[in-house]
Amino acid sequence: MRSHHRTAVAVLSLGLVLAACSDAAEPVTAPAQAGEATPTPTPATQTTDAEDHGAHDAHGGDSHEAVAAGPVSASVLGTSTGSYGPLAEGMGSATNTLVVEGTVTLVKDEYGTQISTNVTGLMSGQPHAAHLHDGSCTDFGGHYMHDHAGPPEPPNEIWLSSSSDPAGSLEPSRTGSAIGSGGADWVPRETPLSMMIHDSEFPGLPIACADFAAYDGPVTLVLEPAADGVEAVEYSLDGGEWVTYEGPVEITGAGSHTVAYAPAGERDDAPQITFTLAGAR
């Protein structure tokens, strides 16, 4: 009975992948892998390299809705470390038997974002795609995109690669271990994020996931005017008094924090960001 159930889940997952790809308004051109010619746009009814590199947006749907730019931008700079674990039944590859373990570290600073990983338990000799995703491991969207209208590939996305190719994959050793890294000159929006490793075979469904659930230690809050006419910015930390923003603010207390921010004097309906500090390790 269990084998029939697992088969049904696999068929359903594959159907979701094909449906998501066929709904695309325009064909997607994936980046060329090392040694390959640059691919040409492919009709949605055919398999593309982008699908082979992790079935882009199939596991969570098209979560990249347009986000209206506000008058003030907010960034939280710091380090977050996640540990890989299996996905809940029905949320990833139903046929996966690999036990993937290891850690992945996300660093956000004034220069952008860098992600690095050390992982074991992968299929030896088989490339595994790994991408930064919207949402957590239990409520995830598609690949995280810096520009919602941009191309589904680096540098608009962050993929982990064992080579110098930013659009490469994790390349396991004979023992199934791999190291990889990726990065960009931008900082992700303050929203739940996760790193997903995908099956090496089509349709490339997830086989392991790591949440960036909390920052490892102190973080730095950076607020910047994002619209003309904004001369001063105010913020409120954890419901406290509104103060004028005069430069980067270090936040050190472990636990959950909420920051509201707005142009000076425009506090009504001010946007908020929420994040968690796990404390020093």
Image: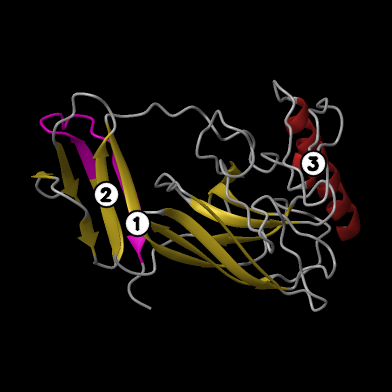
- Where residue 100 appears, as percent x and y from the top left, is 70, 70
Q: Is 51 drawn above or below residue 124 in the view shown?
A: above
Under circle 3, the secondary element is helix
Relative to 16, 208 lies left or right: left
Tags 2 and 3 in contact by the CB under 8 Å rule? no
- Residue assigned mark 3: 49
Relative to 226, 151 lies left or right: right
- Where residue 222 appears, as percent x and y from the top left, is 27, 49
Q: Is 97 drawn above or below residue 58 in the view shown?
A: below
Q: Residue at x 39, y 64 (%)?
A: 215
Q: Is residue 261 visible?
A: yes
Q: Residue at x 80, y 61 (%)?
A: 96
Under circle 1, the secondary element is strand
Give whichever of discs 2 and 1 has the lower sequence position. Answer: 1
Three-letter amino acid code of the residue under disc 3: Asp
Read off the magenta span: 260-277
- Where residue 128 appears, as percent x and y from the top left, is 75, 59
Distance in Å between CA atoms under marks 2 and 3: 37 Å
Using the image, tell me which numbered label, if any, was put on residue 65. none
Distance in Å between CA atoms under marks 2 and 1: 8 Å
In magenta stretch: residue 269: yes
Three-letter amino acid code of the residue under disc 1: Leu
Tags 2 and 1 in contact by the CB under 8 Å rule? yes
Using the image, tell me which numbered label, if any, was put on residue 222. 2
Q: Quadrant of residue 276?
A: bottom left
- Where residue 86 appears, as percent x and y from the top left, is 67, 64
